[in-house]
Image (cartoon, coloured by chain):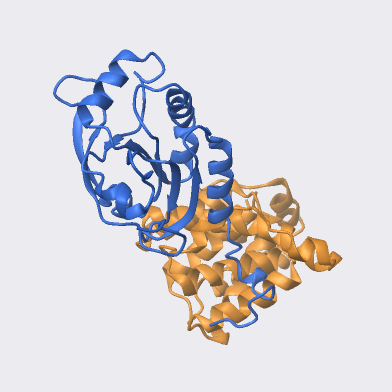
Amino acid sequence: MGLATVGQKFPAFEKTAVVSLEKGKEFETITNDIHTKDGKWMVIFFWPKDFTFVCPTEIAEFGKHNGDFKDRDAVLIGGSTDSEFVHHAWRVHHDDLRGLSYPMLADTSKSLSRELGILTEGEEVCYRATFIVDPQGIIRWVSVNDLSVGRNVKEVIRVLDALQTDELCPCNWEKGQATLS
Amino acid sequence: MHETIQELMADLGVQPGYTTATLEQLGAADSKYLRDLKLNVKSVLTSESLSAKESYLLALAVATNNNNTVLQAAFTAKAKENEASDAEIAEAQACASLLAANNVFYRFRHFVDKEFYNNAPAKLRMNIMMNPVLGKEFFELVSLAVSAVNGCEMCVKSHEQSVLHAGSSEQRVWDAIRLASIITSLSKMVY
C-alpha cells in the first residue's frame, strides 16, 4: 500500500495504548475519537522498535514539547508495531520514558501502519513517520524518515503553526481569493 | 453632583456616586453637552435593528478596545441581564482584542502596499474567527465596529462586505457604527 498523504482521510483505528504506569490504569483503547470528539488536531508519530537507541531520545523530545502541542489544540500520540506490554516494559525501564505524558500506541497487528503505508519491506517495522491530522480527520502533513534518522520536534511544531495560522480575517480576502463565497 | 451625570450613570448601571474629573468640570459649567451625551448613549443602545443583548455586547467590545474598565464592567453586567452567556461575553472581548491586532497589522499592509508585505504570511493565530459562538454575522459586525474605531480602511471595507455577505443589513451596520462612535465618545468622559 502506498504512503497515506495530504488531503486523505486518516484511517479509522482502534488500538490499545499505554497511557500511564499507575497500576490498573496502564492501558486504554484509543480511537480517532481522541481528537475528533473535541475538535482537536492530532500529531501521531511512529518509530521502528522499542528498546533501540535513537528512539528514546526522540520520544522523550516529543514528550518535552507536549505542552506546545496542547497549547495548539493538538493531541499527541506515539506508536510502533510493538505490543502494549513491550511499550509498558520499555517505559518502566527507561529513565527518559517513565514520565511520558502522551499515549504509546500498540499497532501489534500492523493494520494501521500498513494502511498508512509506512512499513519497511521484509521486517515490516515502521519508518519514522509523522502525521498532522486536522480536526476533521484529514491528513495535512506527512513526513517520513528512514530508520536511522531522528526527527526535529520543533519542525513539527513549526508546521502545525503554519497550518493553524491561516489568515482567516476578511481583510486578507483580497489576497489570492477575490471572491467572498 | 449634576443631575444629568447621575442619570447617565443610572442608565449605564454604573454605581451611584461614580464620577470623573472630566464629568465634574462639565457639570460645574452646566455644559449642554452632558445632556446630548446622555441622549446619544440612550439612543444608540436602543436602536431597532439591534437587540438589547447585541447592543451591550457591541458596547462591551468597543469598551474593551478602548481599555475602559469602568464601561467594560457596566456593559458586562448589562449584557448578562439581557441573557448573554459567559462564552458570548468572553468572545465579544476576545474579538475586540484580536481585531485590535488585525487593525494594526492590515493597516500597515494596506498603507505600505508593497509586494513583500502583501505576500508574506501573517503567521498570526485568528482561529476564534472560525466558528464563533456569537454567530458569523454578529462576530463580523463586532469586528467591523472595532475596525471603524481603530481606523483601518482595509478592515472596515472588507468587514462591511463580509457582514452583509453573512446576511446582515445596511441598517444593522449603520446602527453598530453609531453605537461604536458614541461609546468611544463616552469613553472620553467615563473612564
| Position of residue B44 in the picture relative to residue B152 (left or right) | left
Compared to residue B54, the image places residue B123 above or below, namely above
Compared to residue B156, the image places residue A11 above or below, namely above
Compared to residue A12, the image places residue A92 above or below, namely above
| Position of residue B145 in the picture relative to residue B188 (left or right) | left
Q: What shade has chain B been given?
A: orange
> x%, y% of residue B129?
51, 63
Q: Which residue is drawn at 22% across and 32% down?
A: A83
Name the outermost residue toward the front: A122
Q: Which chain is blue?
A: A
Q: Which residue is drawn at 54% across and 55% down?
A: A163
| Position of residue A9 in the picture relative to residue B9 (left or right) | left
| Position of residue B162 in the picture relative to residue A49 (left or right) | right
> x%, y% of residue A135?
38, 57
Q: Which residue is drawn at 49% across and 62% down?
A: B57
Name the outermost residue toward the left: A24
Q: Quadrant of the N terminus of chain A?
A: bottom left
Q: Which residue is drawn at 63% across and 53% down?
A: B124
Whether residue A109 is visible: yes
> x%, y% of residue B66?
66, 54
